[in-house]
Amino acid sequence: MQRITITLDPGLVAEVDRIATLRGYAGRSEAMRDLLRRGLAEARRQLDPDLSCVATFGFVAEAGVRDLGQRLAEIQQRRHDLVIAQVQAPLDHDASLHTLMLRGRARDILAFADEVATQRGIRHDSLSLIPARIELDDHGHGPEPHPHEHIRT
């Protein structure tokens, strides 16, 4: 590792210390590395919308909203290339939590998440993107080669 020196105002140092304590980091350096990684990942997504990534997308859907289930199913079917897996769990009589695992270009995942989040009946949403190299390989795990994706982070 390389040591660097930065100058921060007292309020920012206090915030870093607070985050380090709340999240259980060993110290400021570990907290700063994590914050820097997150900031750089966000900058890469903004600078390179074709960046390939994996993501988790969670949202709370209201029960009983007219055609919401059908609209969500249609959106997911239209972008079946992005959706790897999905879990749905009831929260109470009025809402359920949906969690989707996604894979694809950052631009496509962001557009997909926006389309879902803006549907009538979606209360809250959260998207977490992780840069990952996605490659399509032609090779076999048996007697016949077949193309399939490999994800490398």
Image (cartoon, grey):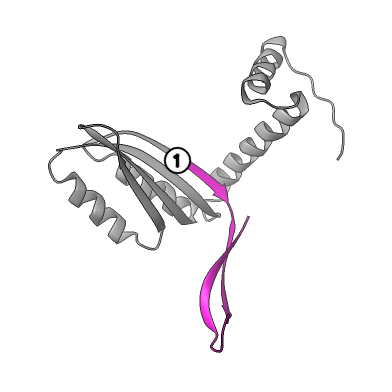
Query: In the drawing, does residue 116 fall left or right of residue 10?
Result: left
State the residue at coordinates (39%, 57%).
83
State the residue at coordinates (34%, 59%).
79
Query: In the drawing, does residue 42 fall left or right of residue 61?
Result: right
Quick one: quadrant of the C terminus? Answer: bottom right
List the single residue furthest toward the left: 66
Count the marks: how many? 1
Give residue 108's position: percent from left, percent from top: 42, 54
Q: What span is colored magenta in the figure?
A: 127-153
Give residue 77's position: percent from left, percent from top: 28, 60
Does 99 lie within the magenta span?
no
State which quadrant residue 5 falls in. top right
Residue 152 to residue 143: above or below: above
Q: What element carries label 1?
A: strand
State the residue at coordinates (29%, 60%).
78
State which quadrant residue 68 falls in. top left
What amino acid type is highlighted by mark number 1?
A: Leu
**Depth order, front residue of 89/38:** 89
Give residue 75's position: percent from left, percent from top: 27, 54
List the single residue furthest toward the top: 10
- Residue bearing the label numbered 1: 127
